Amino acid sequence: MTDFAATRAQFHIPEGVIYLDGNSLGPMPVAAEARAAQAVREEWGEMLIGGWNKAGWMAMPRVLGRHVGRLIGAEPGTVVIGDTLSIKVYQALAAALAMRPERRVVLSDSGNFPTDLYMAQGLIKSLGQDHELRIVAPEEVEAAIDEDIAVVMLTEVDYRTGRLHDMAAISARARAAGALTVWDLAHSAGALPIDLAGSGADFAAGCTYKYLNAGPGAPAFIYVAPRHSDRALPALSGWLGHAAPFAFEQGYRPGEGIDRMRVGTPPVLQMAALEAALGVWDGVSMTDIRARSIELSELFIAEVESRCPQLELASPRDPLQRGSQVSFRFEESYAAVQALIARGVVGDFRAPDIMRFGIAPLYIGEDEIRRAALILQDVMENRLWDDPTYRARAAVT
Ligand SMILES: *Cc1c(COP(=O)(O)O)cnc(C)c1O
């Protein structure tokens, strides 16, 4: 059994804070501070450029990729770290579209995160081949997969509602129709068990600063199924994805397997924090994480629904249809979230009317869930949100 008291002790959570926003930015693992300081002082400071070899900087994207791969059920050597998730979505989609040259439709859903859709729009424009981005309601995705579809591009867990797609069923349906899949695991990696190898997914990408707790600006990861890894061609053909980066050849030759999905110089300091953050997962079972996440989410929903009749559950009621977050609808959600934050409960707001609470068992327990519900009751019952200071929108919401 995973020892959640032990994982909780590995995080720094500021005094008086109940942190239910790890789905947006995970809290700081205690070990990240020392590891990042070591990377700055002992590696960069002392080794200077020698760090690329002596401290293993150049190998980190693949080494850490293997570690992330274990958390998402990927085959060894199929995951590499780098860039941002937006870039990795672009790379995966570009590679997938190139593998279906006779088809012109990218299928996604209206619950997808905007950057995924924006990157698809930008890619389609620069390809100039009249591709279409077809967006349907999340429940209609499966039925919309037909022989016109080149790529099905979805986020497994909806960032607003937490609704969970059936990755295996949709991937099977896509494959039967001759389409490829690109899965965004932003709200899945570290949140629930994923079996990439068994799911039939073709490409996947995700970020490491949400449930993986690697810090603001931490790099993303990309997965390419082994059956495609020597055929998928990177549209962003950077030198570190070249077969021989230090031969400095004039022409691009793709590197072997997943290495070709690297682009440029990796963010070494941020990867040091990622390395420490991944250490927290040693001895943690994703099955235990899922069981605990469901238990805590069910408790939170029951507590909030009995205390706050003003709120409407926006997440699926069936826990098997949810990721690891719980969302509620309320017309003054923005102000209510600000009032909560002022009282130490950190959740977040997503337009137009959603308040979102991430449930991360690594550092959240029953006591925090019960206290958060009581504070939410106070905010709602006493209309504490009804205050102009809570209505003023900050740049980042
Ligand atoms: C958080 C998130 C992103 C963020 O992309 P970045 O490039 O890291 O800013 C992208 N897609 C989804 C689905 C997300 O939830």
Image (spheres, rainbow, N blue to C red):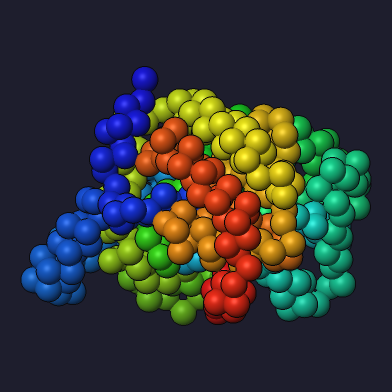
Query: Residue 169: horizontal and vertical position, in percent?
Result: 76, 32
**In the figure, is residue 55 to the left or right of 366?**
left
What residue is at 32 percent from the left and 27 percent from the top?
A: 3
Quadrant for residue 315, please give it: top right
Q: Which of 122 and 16 lies nearest the eye of the viewer? A: 16
Height in image: 334 above or below 326? below
Looking at the image, which residue is at 26% across and 43% down? 10
- Measured as percent of width and height from the top left, residue 230 is found at 56, 50
- Tell me if I can see residue 248 in this picture: yes
Residue at horizontal 80 percent and vertical 41 percent from the top: 174
Q: Residue at x 59, y 35 (%)?
A: 303
Judge from the rendering whether residue 102 lies leftward or rightward of residue 397; answer left or right. right
Q: Position of residue 389 (x, y in %)?
A: 55, 77
Measured as percent of width and height from the top left, residue 226 is found at 56, 41
Q: Quadrant of residue 100?
A: bottom right
Query: Left or right: where does residue 278 sit relative to residue 300?
Result: left
Which of 366/390 is in front?
A: 390
Q: Quadrant of the N terminus?
A: top left
The extreme top residue here reads: 1
Camera-side residue of 129 and 323: 323
